[in-house]
Image (spheres, helix red, strand yellow):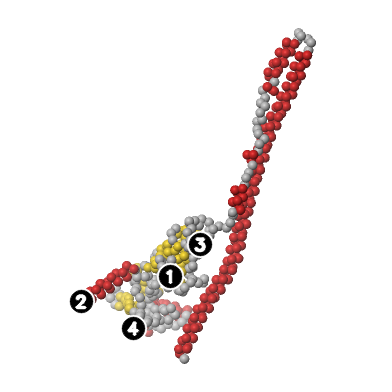
Amino acid sequence: MEDQREALRKIITTLAVKNEEIQSFIYSLKQMLLNVEANSAKVQEDLEAEFQSLFSLLEELKEGMLMKIKQDRASRTYELQNQLAACTRALESSEELLETANQTLQATDSEDFPQAAKQIKDSVTMAPAFRLSLKAKVSDNMSHLMVDFAQERRMLQALKFLPVPSAPVIDLAESLVADNCVTLVWRMPDEDSKIDHYVLEYRRTNFEGPPRLKEDHPWMVVEGIRQTEYTLTSLKFDMKYMNFRVKACNKAVAGEFSEPVTLETPAFMYRLDASTSHQNLRVDDLSVEWDAMGGKVQDIKAREKDGKGRTASPVNSPARGTPSPKRMPSGRGGRDRFTAESYTVLGLLSFYNARTKQLLHTFKAKFTQPLLPAFTVWCGSFQVTTGLQVPSSVRCLQKRGSATSSSNTSLT
């Protein structure tokens, strides 16, 4: 019966997890439908604006070129009309001289003939007809204002949507998590010489597997990455995993994100147990501060005054008895269950009165993996830094030390 109950509990857990995944996927699909509507409206608006810009530009170019034709026509017309008027006047003057010359030649009075002939000769010498150029000042050819938009028409016919970069592929085999740093490596599925840079996004999570849409922590963005790898440094691993995704960008647009990946970020999360502390120690998970007025007593009185619950008095507090070990949270919110493969190390952190050397309190905690302690003492307070990994250099030294110890043991 108990086995069946346990099996049923596992089925319930599996179904609950699957239901949560389906609900998350349904939410994702609904969000994608909304995004499709919004994004399609935006790109349609952008397309219409671009074509309107082209229409405006073409209209502006058309007006400018038409104005050029009109100005050239007006200039040539003006020159030709002036030249035509000058030639007309010269012709009239020349016809008058010709008529005068014919009349003089036919005259019978020989005494006046020499004088009249001389006058006609002088008039011909000064006549406009002999000082006028009979070559047109401008041409009537307008071929220099002709156009051929065959090439431009082909360019317009070749208009299409911008080429979008492909989604990168994250290489998990080459990526590395160590020393509170994450080095992420990716590659492009196809060679693309037009890629300008990459954008990396990451966030912390306590859930293994594909990233969920609803998370407490937002995506952090790193832009302007020029290489196909990037190292995030000085990270605090205060959650179990981190999600990563990358997208490529050219000069115009950004491509789709890569398939997101989840990397485990193992680090020991340390907390100070306030329930077993001395009454003059004010404890807040990661920091301890001495309070001569009795920090814990003041907190208890404040909680009682606000009606938020009654707490045992300092006299009956476990701080005056045997200190209880710190309860470390497990994945289910209860106490850790240590298997035979695990190991347990008891860590002690003691506080003394610097003048009287009197022991104030000792914190106890159980560690089931290597721990990198990082403490800060400043202005009468004590602070613990958590979420740090044991440096790889320390692990290498531990391995070398272990190997040396084994060799020495084999030699003895």
**Disc 2 or 3, which lies upstream in sequence?**
3
Q: Is residue 127 above or below residue 333?
A: above
Residue under pointer 3:
166
Check residue 263 in the rendering and tell me which mark sits there, or answer none.
Answer: 1
Q: Is residue 154 at all visible to an observer of this figure?
A: yes
Q: Is residue 361 left or right of residue 121?
A: left
Marks 2/3: CA distance?
62 Å
Distance in Å between CA atoms under marks 3 and 4: 63 Å
Q: Nearer the viewer, residue 217 or 405?
A: 405
Which is more foreground, mark 3 or mark 4? Answer: 3
Foreground mark, 3 or 1, reads 3
Q: Tag 3: Cα neighbours inside 10 Å, few (<14), some, or many (≥20)?
A: many
| Residue on which the image places disc 4 | 322
Q: Earlier in the sequence, mark 4 or mark 2?
A: 4
CA gap between label 1 and label 4 equals 41 Å
Q: CA distance from mark 3 to mark 1?
A: 23 Å
CA–CA distance between discs 4 and 2? 43 Å
Asked if the residue at tag 3 contacts the one at tag 2, i.e. Cβ–Cβ closer than 8 Å, the answer is no
Q: Are marks 1 and 4 in contact (CB under 8 Å)?
A: no
Does residue 68 show up? no
Query: To which quarter of the image does residue 274 belong?
Result: bottom left
Q: Position of residue 31 (x, y in %)?
A: 57, 69
Q: What residue is shown at x 33% (from left), y 77% (from top)?
A: 347
Spatial CA span between label 2 and label 1: 44 Å
Assess disc 4: are there few (<14), some (14-19) or many (≥20) residues with their C-alpha within 10 Å of its C-alpha: few
| Neighbours of disc 1 within 10 Å: few (<14), some (14-19), many (20+) | many
SS class, disc 3: loop
Disc number at residue 412?
Answer: 2
